[in-house]
Amino acid sequence: MKTTTLKRLRENNACERGYKLISEHVGVDFAGEIPLEIILDNNGLSDCIWSLRATDGGKEIAQEFAIRAGKKVYFEKSWVEWADRWLDGTDRSKDAAYAAADAAYAAAYAAADAAADAAADAAYAAADAAYAAADAAAYAAAYAAYAAADAARTKMKLENTELLRSLIK
């Protein structure tokens, strides 16, 4: 089980909000080890990921978490092959990591540009349709799209929370 302490969190400049949440949960004078799972449950995924910097072995957990989470959404062949080699320990060289990162950045920027263009086009089209229709159906469609996006975001957050939980136990 991976742990940290209030002292290590302070030494690593924890944000005021996150520090306050966990210190109020465990007690402001608590000097013992805090399981990261407590931070995950009490403060949430982002604070728990941040807390890895104040945890022995946290860098390796953060790397593994990032790669495993990335594999859920990024499928470019050379990057996935590198990720698999990193995860199974056959190639953790800096050169291979930089090459994979460069390929991923290039693909991500290209995808982001394309997605941004498509999203802008879709947003303009949706706005035009909403103004033209100006009825309940347009609002219902917009709400349904928002709800679907929110559900997908929630599902991914839950999956990543459970992934991190499995790595910090």
Image (spheres, rainbow, N blue to C red):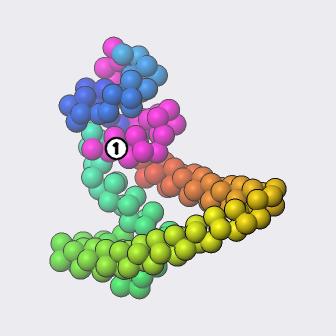
Of residues 139 and 155, the one nearer the viewer is 139
Q: Position of residue 65 (x, y in %)?
A: 40, 58
Which quadrant holds residue 67? bottom left
Q: Position of residue 21 (x, y in %)?
A: 43, 26
Kindly identify the residue that appears in the image at 31 percent across and 20 percent down. Answer: 31
Residue 55 on the magenta segment: no
Part of the protein shown in magenta? 29-53
Of residues 99 and 143, the one nearer the viewer is 143
The residue to which callout 1 is attached is 50
Kindly identify the residue that appears in the image at 27 percent across and 52 percent down. Answer: 59
Q: Position of residue 40 (x, y in %)?
A: 47, 40
Q: Position of residue 104 (x, y in %)?
A: 34, 76
Which quadrant holds residue 156? bottom right
In the rendered view, does 131 fall on the left or right side of 18?
right
Q: Is residue 31 visible?
A: yes
Q: Please say if 82 is above or below 70.
A: below
